[in-house]
Image (cartoon, helix red, strand yellow):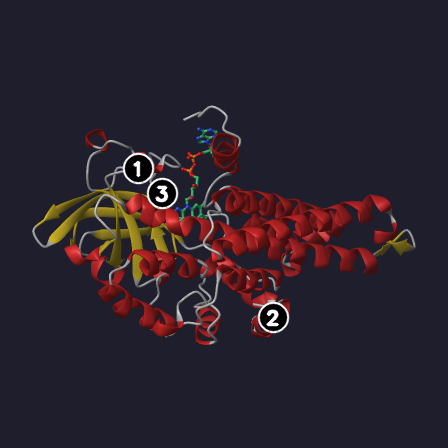
Amino acid sequence: MSNQDLDSIRESVRQLCSNYGEDYWLELDRNRGYPTEFVRELTESGFLTVLIPEEYGGAGLGVSEAAVVMEEVCRSGAHAGACHAQMYVMGSVLRHGTDEQKKTYLPAIAAGELRLQSFGVTEPTTGTDTTSLKTVARRDGDHYVVNGQKVWISRIEHSDLMVLLARTTPKEETRKKTEGLSAFLIDVREAVGNGLTIRPIESMINHHSCELFFDDLKIPASSLLGKEGEGFKVILDGMNAERILIAAECVGDGRYFIDKASAYATERTVFNRPIGQNQGVQFPIARCYAEVEAASLMVEKAARMFDEGLPCGAEANMAKMLASEASWRAGDVCMQTHGGFAFAKEYHIERKFRETRLYQIAPISTNLILSFIGEHVLKMPRSF
Ligand SMILES: Cc1cc2nc3c(=O)[nH]c(=O)nc-3n(C[C@H](O)[C@H](O)[C@H](O)COP(=O)(O)OP(=O)(O)OC[C@H]3O[C@@H](n4cnc5c(N)ncnc54)[C@H](O)[C@@H]3O)c2cc1C
């Protein structure tokens, strides 16, 4: 797609977002509400389903275009965390689902009749050490029976489907620790009350994250996504797209903070001159601008490689790390530029500041990215 086409996506997303001003997001943050109308409009306009192939009712575009959508959503002051998962979780169904699964789910997701917003991997006792997770799915005739616990599973209360990762073969009985895990596409509507209990977590941002308890949840064997024992691959395939899209959101957040900081520094007068005339105020904003622009180039590179089918684990990880750090620094500088007013909710900065902080921790923390680069790119000794 040409730069002109990307600019036209940008402009359309900007227009859509302008119907949902910052007060809309502030109110949701206060009430812990979900942006149902916004997500509906983003879906109906085709932006949330850009990655779904045309034969299933989507736009059939790439991660480069999807990244532009997410960046603009965040730049408008919105919180994309309410809906971004639909883009990348759907990729697991697309790449690993059977024809039957694809025909059943993808057109309905593209039409906005089904929501696939949830992705269940993290567990309270094992955290980042994914292959040690303890949730178990045991085959029982035409069913699997799931037992275990997950934590921080976002948007599950606003999703009809969830992709779940569970162990089907004990780790001790596998050759490699990544084997013996399986992915399942679970119908949340049928599961709740029949072995799945959901408990919301009160958290720093309005991200709708929950604890999940599985107590003999019976799911049809046809819920299996990909091959039994190869679920790690199913999940991993979606992770590069997830990292690139979240990095794009951070670029959007960074640009939001820089727009706000530079405008305020120009208009706010103290000691009879605009505060931005002082280099102590101006230079940190300029530095953040340079950092966000550099991160944006890495996002573009990773997205292009993803769309060309090239291995892009290192680029996707680096994009996520650089962009999440750049957006956080831009948020901090934006806070400092606004002085005391940064703390007033009506300025919206403190909300975005809290929201962008997440991305140095989730979906993967910075240390784990550094360890990936150290081990896989620079070939240094493995640490865990
Ligand atoms: C708001 C929110 C939403 C989330 N949504 C989802 C979701 O929808 N689905 C889902 O599955 N998960 C979700 N998560 C979970 C998220 O992916 C994890 O929190 C994240 O991967 C980190 O895992 P952890 O919290 O268990 O940290 P831990 O694994 O306990 O790590 C804690 C700290 O120690 C560091 N650390 C750990 N081991 C090492 C090591 N060997 N070397 C160096 N440093 C190390 C980490 O970098 C981290 O900083 C969400 C989390 C949050 C906060």
The Cα atoms of the two marked residues, 2 and 3, are separated by 33 Å
Judging by the rendered image, the residue that carries numbered circle 3 is 122
Q: Nearer the viewer, mark 2 or mark 1?
A: 1
What element does badge 3 sit on?
A: loop
In percent of the image, x 64 and y 53: which residue is there? Answer: 254
Q: To which quarter of the image does residue 194 belong?
A: bottom left
- Decide if residue 32 is in sight here: no
Whether residue 33 sits left or right of residue 341 in the image: it is left
Q: Earlier in the sequence, mark 3 or mark 1?
A: 3
What residue is at 82 percent from the left and 60 percent from the top? 267
Which residue is at 44% across, 26% downward?
382
* Residue drawn at the location 26% of the way across and 45% of the way down: 230
Q: Which residue is mark 2?
A: 14
- Is 2 placed above or below 271 here? below
Where does residue 357 sit, x and y in percent of width and height? Answer: 56, 46
In the image, is 350 to the left or to the right of 314?
right
Dot 1 alpha-carbon crowd within 10 angstroms: few under 14, some 14 to 19, many 20 or more: some
Q: For residue 178, which numbered disc appears in the image?
A: 1
Q: Amino acid at mark 3?
A: Thr
